[in-house]
Amino acid sequence: MTIDINALALVLAQAAEAEIRPRFRALAKGDVHTKADANDLVTVADEAAERFIKREVAAQFPGVLFVGEESVAADPALLSKLGDAETAIVVDPIDGTFNFASGVPLFGVMAAIVSGGETVGGIIYDPMGDDFVMAEKGSGTWQTGDHRPAVKLKARGGAALEDLTGMASTSFLDRDRRARILSNLAKVAFVSNYRCAAHEYRTFAGGHLHYLMYNKLMPWDHLAGTLIAQEAGAYAARFDGSAYKPHHTEGGLLVAPDKDTWELLRREVFVD
């Protein structure tokens, strides 16, 4: 089944208008809950937005497998169906929930379109800026919305190791490897993270960063962003050099302007 990416993008924006923005900085104490640990949060806005998106996907794209972060939290077996699905839509209703719950306006709504085990479409919507960064396989990466004409995005070019700037999420690494990588990051010019993959991928695709690194690979966090980065001209692979696929949840992910920069970062910074 062919998914109209623009129709799907509109659903994300409608969900944000109905369920997310009205709750920003308006959450009651009982509206926020923890999942795996104290830093892994879910809010009533996450749950309501996912219900909204799931309902619209079922109405507009009947028969498509829907894989949402909160749906998988309720039914973990759903995740295993992604690799074999003919067509699937993978959704993160609020990426950056910690920021959202903290009143920090740095969060996004993400969706990826998966066909035959391959990511073919990706959308990252910024509810606060009311614009989209979107990509379809083979068609480039575009920023559109907020009453502005669409702009084609291009990833930043490579640089010397000491001039590289980027984002790295080290929290899911084991302690020894995290210590090695944090020490190695002194070799580059700049490292940070937004606690929000949606905005990290948007920033990278816009040409403002040289690299992104993640260890835990839940599909709602990275499928859309990886395609967006690749369609902006970047090189992305798991730590062992293999391609990142929708069914992968382990193996790490490193995104860089080109393969040479990827290999430089892997050798000098993101070591085993």
Image (cartoon, grey):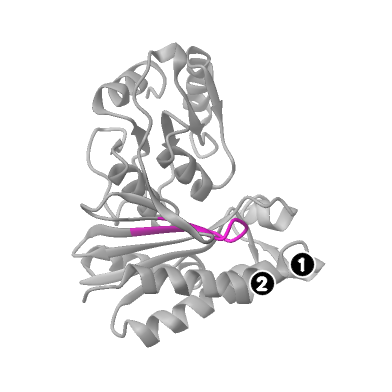
Q: Is residue 53 left or right of residue 62?
A: right
Is residue 128 in the magenta section?
A: yes
* Amino acid type at image mark 1: Leu
Observer-nearest of 245 and 133: 133
Total numbered badges shown on the rendered structure: 2
Q: Is residue 44 left or right of residue 246?
A: right
Question: What residue sits right under mark 2 in the picture?
Answer: 44
Q: Quadrant of residue 49?
A: bottom right
- Give SS at disc 1: loop
> Which residue sits at x=41%, y=28%?
210
Q: Is residue 146 left or right of residue 22?
A: left
- Give SS at disc 2: helix
Observer-nearest of 249 and 162: 162
Report the Cα–Cα distance between label 1 and label 2. Answer: 8 Å
Instruction: Give the main secondary structure of the magenta stretch.
Output: strand
* Amino acid type at image mark 2: Val
Q: Quadrant of residue 135?
A: bottom left
Q: In the picture shown, does residue 245 fall above or below 42?
A: above
Q: Are marks 1 and 2 in contact (CB under 8 Å)?
A: yes
The stretch of residues the image draws in magenta is: 122-133
